[in-house]
Amino acid sequence: MLYGGRKIGSFDMWSIVSERVKDLFEAEQFTGARFYPAELVYSQRNKQFKFEESYYVMAVVGRAEIDFAAMGVKCSICPKCGHYVFEGKFPLGVREKKGIYPTIMKEDTWDGSDLFGHNNCTERFVVKILSNKLSGFVFFTI
Ligand SMILES: [Zn+2]
């Protein structure tokens, strides 16, 4: 999960989360994600075993468009393989080593959700996740 940025090439917009994450999300009335029950299994000697704990797929549904033009990047889709193609140099590449680049969103396209776009979130979401000591999240700020 990224706060104010994204990883290049990472367009995953769903995660597997524990029931604690879902409960906090609902208790705090966060917006921008939907939860679906996930059944996690592991395999041992060709047999599958279910995890006892409840897990969920957290799918980000909040919207905000990336302003590629403002970032000096031309984004297109390769007609041969269907992958994203980025042309141009990403600005402010000071965190290049970590592979983290600032994302400029089109503010008027943000639907106001706490989770939105490609793994972006509001500061309130970050604060609550951290103060509740939920693990497995990594937040970046630019
Ligand atoms: Zn291609």
Image (spheres, helix red, strand yellow):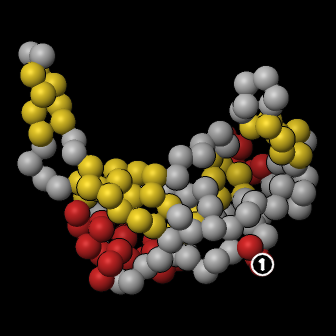
Q: Is residue 75 above or below residue 61?
A: above
Q: Amino acid at mark 1?
A: Asp
Image-based side of 71 in relation to 65, left or right:
right
Q: Is residue 49 shown left or right of residue 116?
A: left
Q: How many numbered marks appear?
A: 1
Q: Which residue is mark 1?
A: 108
Q: Is residue 9 left or right of residue 91?
A: left
The location of residue 5, given as percent across then percent down, is 64, 58
- Whether residue 98 appears in this view of the structure is no
Residue 43 visible in the displayed image: yes
Q: Nearer the viewer, residue 48 or 106?
A: 48
- Picture quadrant where residue 125 is located: bottom left
Q: Quadrant of the C terminus?
A: bottom right
Left or right, 137 with respect to 69, comes to left
Q: Residue 119: which quarter of the image? A: bottom right
- Look at the numbered disc 1 and give the secondary structure of its residue: helix
